[in-house]
Image (spheres, grey):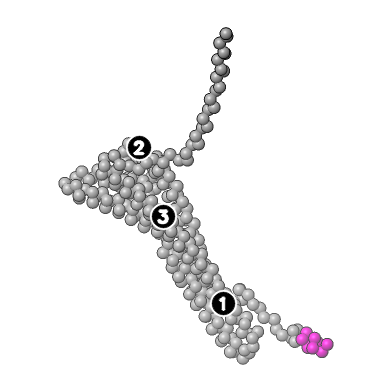
């Protein structure tokens, strides 16, 4: 019974420690708030780039269906270009192919003509891929640096906690665990910012490689079409095949009556 009374008295006499995220930020001071602001900017920028690039990639892939179903049905590259959206990379490639086709006649050497058309389409592909890759270096930077930015906040928080403990002259576990645990929050925030950025970078990079392969295929088809004066072009995609109608059942003809004897 005396033990319970002593424990209750000790609990009432002990000062209540206030722990939490806000308290940890107050203890960290301007440095902690600055690090938190940097990680918030990193996180917001990462998600903005993630969704905008995803929308851009989906739009480009959707426009490629028009290339497969409508572009190659036309009688010329100039007419086919009008079937494509003006802001699409496929329209850019088609327009560059038309210009290369118009300029290649000025070349006196047939080999130089082929190299000129191939180089024009390659430059167009490179510019499109550069636009599609825009923003991805930011995701890679966030994924690589956010954990270390959070770790910097943790180091500063632990340093301040140890200084305060040393000044107070009390190094008991209840005095150490709270401030040090609060300082580790910054490392956790850094990881929460970095992990989505790394996943988004790898995923979007893979989709960009797929689009780059589609651009290369379209560029190769355009070059073959120009060098063969329209004789060589890919097969036109007509969409989902229509199910064949079942064959009509043969109508039974009545048997001829037997001749009378």
Question: Relative to 49, is 256 above or below?
Answer: above
Residue shown at 16%/46% (left/top)?
Answer: 108
Q: Label 2 belongs to which residue? A: 74
Q: Residue furthest front?
A: 261
Q: Which residues are magenta?
A: 1-8
Q: Nearer the viewer, residue 253 or 104?
A: 253
Q: Residue at x 52, y 80 (%)?
A: 155
Which comes sooner in the sequence, label 1 or label 3? 1
Cα gap from disc 2 to disc 3, whole angstroms = 26 Å
**Distance from Cα at disc 2 to Cα at disc 1:** 64 Å
Residue, x 48% and y 61% (percent of image)? Answer: 200
Numbered badge on residue 184: 1
Give whichever of 70, 49 is nearer the camera: 70
Category of crowding for the residue at label 3, using alpha-carbon neighbours closer than 10 angstroms: few (below 14), some (14–19), many (at least 20) = few
Percent of width and height locating residue 22: 61, 73
Task: From the viewer's perspective, tell me whether residue 200 is left or right of residue 221.
Answer: right
């Amino acid at each position: 019974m005396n033990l319970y009374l002593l424990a209750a008295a000790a609990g009432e006499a002990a000062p209540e420690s206030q722990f939490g995220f806000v308290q940890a930020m107050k203890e960290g001071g301007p440095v902690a708030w600055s690090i938190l602001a940097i990680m918030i900017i990193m996180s917001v920028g990462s998600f903005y780039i993630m969704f905008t690039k995803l929308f851009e990639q989906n739009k480009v892939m959707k426009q490629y269906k028009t290339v497969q179903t409508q572009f190659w049905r036309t009688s010329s590259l100039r007419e086919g270009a009008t079937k494509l959206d003006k802001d699409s990379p496929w329209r850019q490639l088609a327009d560059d192919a038309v210009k290369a086709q118009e300029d290649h006649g000025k070349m006196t050497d047939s080999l130089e003509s082929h190299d000129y058309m191939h180089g024009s389409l390659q430059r167009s592909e490179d510019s499109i891929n550069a636009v599609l890759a825009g923003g991805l270096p930011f995701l890679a930077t966030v994924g690589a640096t956010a954990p270390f930015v959070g770790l910097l906040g943790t180091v500063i928080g632990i340093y301040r906690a140890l200084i305060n403990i040393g000044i107070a002259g009390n190094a008991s576990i209840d005095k150490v665990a709270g401030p040090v645990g609060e300082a580790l929050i910054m490392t956790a925030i850094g990881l929460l910012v970095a992990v989505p950025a790394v996943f988004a970078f790898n995923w979007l990079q893979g989709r960009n490689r797929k689009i780059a392969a589609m651009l290369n295929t379209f560029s190769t088809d355009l070059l073959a079409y120009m060098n063969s004066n329209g004789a060589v072009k890919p097969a036109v995609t007509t969409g989902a095949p229509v199910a064949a109608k079942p064959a009509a059942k043969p109508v039974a003809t009545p048997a001829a009556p037997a001749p009378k004897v």
